Structures are given as C-alpha cells and as structure tokens.
C-alpha cells in the first residue's frame, strides 16, 4: 500500500495477491483534494497485459500496440471523474503464462480477477477514508482486452455497473449476456479496418443481445484499426449523458434503469437516428442510444465527422 499527493489530488496504491486466473493485480485510486462523498468509481482498463495506472496520475502516457501508439492524458479521466463525483481507478491486471496468450484468461472475471478489483476497492476505501467506495457503482472504459474485462464484469455484476465501454477487443467468454446486463447501457466500438475476427465477434455479441433489447450501441469507426481512434471523444459525451441518469438519487441506493422507449434508434446502414420505435427495433440490429446528444455524437463518429 502507498499514498501520494500532487497538485491535482491524491493517489492510493494497492496490490492484491496472485489469484486463480491472473498473475498481477495492482490498482491505483485517484481522488481530488478534499472530495465530497463519492458517488461511484470510473475504472479505466488498458489492453492485453498493459498498465492503466499511469492514466490516473501522470500527465500523459504513450504505449499500446506495436503498430499504433496512443496518447492518453490523465486530465481527461480526472475531468470525467470530477464532473460526476467519482473516484478514478487504474488497473494493472496480467495473465499467468499459458499456451495461447492472445486469450486473456484474466478477463474471466468470475474466476478471481473481478473479485480482485472489488477487494482492491475495499482496501482503498479504508486507505482513503471513503467507506462508500467499498460498494460503489462502477463505470468502465477499456481498450482491447480492457473492453473484454469490462464487458465480462458487467455480465458478472450488472448491479454494480453504471455503464461500460467495450472497445475493439477480440476474446469474449459470454455470448448472450444476462437480462440484467442487457439493461446496463454500453458502447461496443469496432474499427472498420480492424481484424475480421474481432469485428465478427463484436458484431455477433451486439446483434444477439440487441435482439433481446440490450441498451447498447455499436459504433464502427471509419478507417480505424486496433486503436483508440476517436472512441474517447464519443465515450466522453456518452458518460456525461448516461452517468447522471444512472446514478442513484439517494446515497448507496440502486442504479436507476433506462427506459427503451425514452431512447433513440441508430440505423447502422444509413447512420441516421430517430426516436425509439418498437417495430423498427424488430426489423434488425439498430444502435440504442439513451439521449439525442449521444445519438448525434454516434452519427458524427460513424460518418467520420467532428462532434
């Protein structure tokens, strides 16, 4: 355990012992100075066996794939957390060595890695003097394996999940999500020029669960490969709209549901959107968007236009 201070806030570090389906489980919590009662936690999860803790504290950090770098600025995450009264959590969860390392076993959150995250929050709630973090709801953003982890966590603990971003990952262990998870709003990002394997899997998960009324949106980024691309832009708009709608009205209350009928449907072929229509939803997969502002952002990203 360790604690540090800087001009932007406080950080707290904790390590959870090695578990059944993971090697390392290290976490960093960021809080603004003298925060009020925290309403939840924004969890940022990096790609396969990479570390998102620098996103929480350092001004910027570049590293992701052999072919593409990303530049993730801590002020982006801190700004989101501040606007919504959230703590910010960075994670370094890694696999034990095994035969097929492209299959991230630590994304099977129900086999130990998910509990490691929850145990870390319990310890961090004590370190920080914020007991509300022990059972706080969580909003997830992740790239590649980070998105896989987030999706599987939403399937495992939907009652703890405010929203999730599944971003261009490739190995998912749950095809049809539980009904409670389908009621959790989320974004599934695909890159137009990413691997056909990844895109096929993401499209399959989306189509199957949207048919069962999942409150999810599929966003295909034009010309994007396996990279963050513009997903941060849309995620920011999405989080700013969805998190206030989902957070409990009373401290430690339950997350509020989102009504299908109050949302918008995005046509994946024409990239147009309109208020929810049940008959249109039955015709084939459509993106479900919770507000008109998120629908406008989705349309801009799908068309390669500025937000």
Image: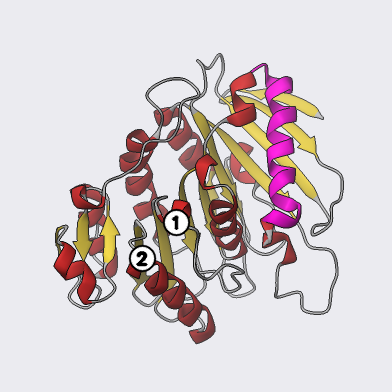
Whether the magenta-drawn stretch holds residue 129 is answered as yes
Query: Where does the N terminus fall, quadrant-wise?
Result: top right
Q: Write down the region rendered in magenta.
A: 110-130
Question: Where residue 93 is drawn, which disc sits there?
Answer: none
Q: Residue at the location (86% across, 44% down)?
A: 17
How are the residues colored? secondary structure
Binning the other alpha carbons within 10 Å of mark 2 as few (below 14), some (14 to 19) or many (20 upward) gives: some
Q: Is residue 3 left or right of residue 146?
A: right
Residue drawn 45% across and 28% down?
A: 82
Where is residue 169? Give x, y as percent: 55, 69
**Disc 1 secondary structure class:** helix
Q: Are marks 1 and 2 in contact (CB under 8 Å)?
A: yes
For the point 77% across and 48% down, which residue is it? 25
* Residue at numbered disc 2: 212
Q: Is residue 11 magenta?
A: no
Quarter of the view holding residue 133 = top right
């Amino acid at each position: 355990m360790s604690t540090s201070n800087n001009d932007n806030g406080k950080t707290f570090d904790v390590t959870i012992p090695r578990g059944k389906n993971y090697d390392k489980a290290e976490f960093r919590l960021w809080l603004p100075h003298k925060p009020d009662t925290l309403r939840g936690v924004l969890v940022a999860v990096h790609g396969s066996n990479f570390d998102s803790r620098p996103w929480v504290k350092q001004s910027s950090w570049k590293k992701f794939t052999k072919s593409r770098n990303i530049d993730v600025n801590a002020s982006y995450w801190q700004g989101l957390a501040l606007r919504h009264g959230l703590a910010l959590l960075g994670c370094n969860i890694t696999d034990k060595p095994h035969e097929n390392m492209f299959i991230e076993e630590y994304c099977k959150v129900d086999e130990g890695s998910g509990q490691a995250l929850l145990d870390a929050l319990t310890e961090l709630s004590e370190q920080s003097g914020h007991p509300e973090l022990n059972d706080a709801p969580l909003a997830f953003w992740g790239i590649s394996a980070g998105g896989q982890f987030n999706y599987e966590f939403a399937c495992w603990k939907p009652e703890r999940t405010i929203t999730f971003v599944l971003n261009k990952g490739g190995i998912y262990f749950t095809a049809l999500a539980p009904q409670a998870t389908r009621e959790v709003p989320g974004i599934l990002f695909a890159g137009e020029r990413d691997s056909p394997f990844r895109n096929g899997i993401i499209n399959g998960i989306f189509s199957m669960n949207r048919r069962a009324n999942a409150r999810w949106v599929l966003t295909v980024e034009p010309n994007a490969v396996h990279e963050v691309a513009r997903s941060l832009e849309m995620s920011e708009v999405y989080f700013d709209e969805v998190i206030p709608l989902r957070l409990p009205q009373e401290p430690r209350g339950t997350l509020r549901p989102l009504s299908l009928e109050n949302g918008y449907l995005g046509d994946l072929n024409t990239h147009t959107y309109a208020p929810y229509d049940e008959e249109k939803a039955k015709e084939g997969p459509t993106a479900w968007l919770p507000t008109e502002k998120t629908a406008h952002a989705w349309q801009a990203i799908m068309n390669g236009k500025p937000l």
